[in-house]
Amino acid sequence: MTTETAPKELCLSLLCEAFMALQTHEDYEEFLKDLCTPAELHAICGRWMVALMISQKTPYRKICEQTGVSTATITRVAKFMESGYGGYRTALQKISGPDSPTLSPEDKMKGETNGSNIKR
């Protein structure tokens, strides 16, 4: 099956199934690194950092300065957070639940992502 012959919805569904089959952080990371080019992964990570920072009411100018993401991308992420499919909202709610680790996007940008810096 090629992407030209398979309906896009089916391809997306199969990709979602692959993500759902993964169980560990390492599994996800390896899959993403295999699936995406470095540039694609950088862009996806940038958009996620923007979403995290927008959710914490960080000013767009500061987001741009800290992430290097363009203001056009920041605006696009904000628009989808407001009136997209709800994916950003769902993911943000799930990671900010009572049992989820919390680490500010600024700390993440500094590379402080090991378990000792995560508050529960």
Image (cartoon, helix red, strand yellow):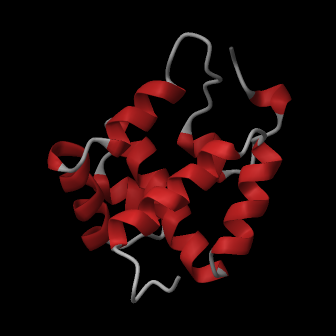
Residue 9, given in percent of the width and then of the height, sits at 34, 64
Give the farthest residue toward the top: 98
Residue 65, given in percent of the width and then of the height, sits at 44, 63
Give the farthest residue toward the left: 83
Q: Do we see residue 56 in this rendering?
A: no
Seen in the picture, residue 5 relative to 83 is either above or below; the reply is: below
Residue 29, given in percent of the width and then of the height, sits at 74, 56
Q: Could you tell whether 80 is left or right of 51 in the image?
A: left
In which quadrant of the rendered image does the C terminus lie? Answer: top right
> Picture quarter containing residue 55?
top left
- For the residue pair 72 and 59, the one nearer the viewer reads as 72
Residue 73, given in percent of the width and then of the height, sits at 31, 69
Residue shown at the point (82%, 38%) measured from the top left: 114
Seen in the picture, residue 98 relative to 19 is either above or below; the reply is: above
Q: Could you tell whether 87 is left or right of 28 in the image?
A: left
Seen in the picture, residue 93 relative to 9 is either above or below; the reply is: above
- For the residue pair 41 and 19, the one nearer the viewer reads as 19
Q: Do we see residue 2 in this rendering?
A: yes
Residue shown at the point (82%, 30%) measured from the top left: 115
Q: Could you tell whether 9 is left or right of 65 in the image?
A: left
Residue shown at the point (62%, 75%) measured from the top left: 36
- For the residue pair 26 and 117, the one nearer the viewer reads as 26
Residue shown at the point (30%, 55%) measured from the top left: 60
* Total marks in image: 0
